[in-house]
Image: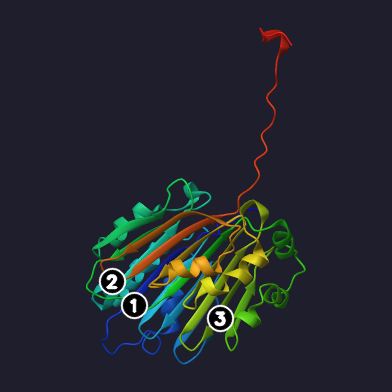
Amino acid sequence: MFFEGSEKKVEVIIKDIGFSLINDVNDEFWYQLVDKANAKILSCIQNDVCKAFILSESSLFVWHNRFIILTCGVTHLVNAIEYFIQEQGVDVIEHLSYQRKNEYYSHAQPSCFGDDVKVLTQYIKGKALRFGEMDSHHTFLFYNDTDTQLKHKSYELLTYQISEEASNKLTDTQISADEIRIFLQLDTLLPGFILDDHMFKPYGYSVNAIKEDKYLTIHITPQAESSYVSFESNINLIEISPILLERLKPKSFDLLSFNDENFEDSIEQYIDQKYVSKSLVKQNLTNGCQVHFANYVLPQKEFIAAAPFDLLDSHHEL
């Protein structure tokens, strides 16, 4: 059974106007916003500074002055952004970024990145970039072009074609959420975090984790024909990537960082040298944000079938 695990992502930061997205916006608004993207809220955890919602397709995180929403499958995330702008007003937005990575079956999506940008630029002027090669793994980014100097860090680790062993384990219909937590070593990686997870039928898994203003979300599409596991966080995923990569053993993966000036030193220190870097992009955005993108592959021995040799067509004596 195929499922499009690749996410679309929006981050919105609001202006400092004495308005809180947690205290002054009720949950019904977020239910409506998620519904506009063709997804549903399944559960929620909360601390003093963050609400984390698990969605039928990925996750939503809300802080007092910003929110991040990720959706996968055939969701139409740009509709959720438009809903926020129409309900809250474009003038409350300090920063908006919209990411969309390449899909397995882009023709099945309700829109493409270009379509989405056309919707956004009705309200917000911005710039669009591509990170990575067009014929390989890549991510599109649209952001509003403002004088805001963004300095907060975040990371994405996107893994593809996980090992047969990992795929078989994660598609076992008898596996429990606790067993997946143990498999990914989440207790070791996330001490003191509150976790909320969900098992999908027949398989698939999502978990949100929060601790103060820190967050991490993981989404697993384990089926062999389209296996994909994504990690999104403001904790340093590069430093914990050796554990995650050892567990999943993907054939390839992408790393993205926002405002990590030590990115290149970190990947040299933490990424297993058996993976080969296929691309490395560094871009300073006009809003002060520094973006890094790297794609890695696990080299495979290439076996080429012997070509048939027709003796009757040959003019050479053997």
Question: If the image is split into quadrants, where does the C terminus sit?
Answer: top right
Amino acid type, label 2: Gly
Q: Which residue is mark 2?
A: 288
Q: Which residue is mark 1?
A: 151
Q: Nearer the viewer, residue 294 or 213?
A: 294
Q: Nearer the viewer, residue 92 or 306?
A: 306
Is mark 2 in CB contact (under 8 Å) with mark 3?
A: no
Amino acid type, label 3: Ala
Amino acid type, label 1: Lys
User: What's the residue at 42%, 72% (across, down)?
Assistant: 262
Task: Please give left or right for residue 286 compared with residue 1 in the image.
Answer: left
Question: How packed is label 2: few (under 14 Cα within 10 Å), some, or many (20 or more)?
Answer: some
Relative to 119, is 19 above or below?
below
Mark 2 or 3, closer to the camera: 2
Q: CA distance from mark 1 to mark 2?
A: 7 Å
What's the mark number on residue 209?
3
Question: How packed is label 1: few (under 14 Cα within 10 Å), some, or many (20 or more)?
Answer: few
Is mark 1 in CB contact (under 8 Å) with mark 2?
A: yes
- Residue 194 pos. (x, y %): 58, 86
- Residue 275 pos. (x, y %): 58, 57
First-in-chain label (1 vs 3): 1
Residue at the bottom extreme of this rendering: 48
What's the mark number on residue 317?
none
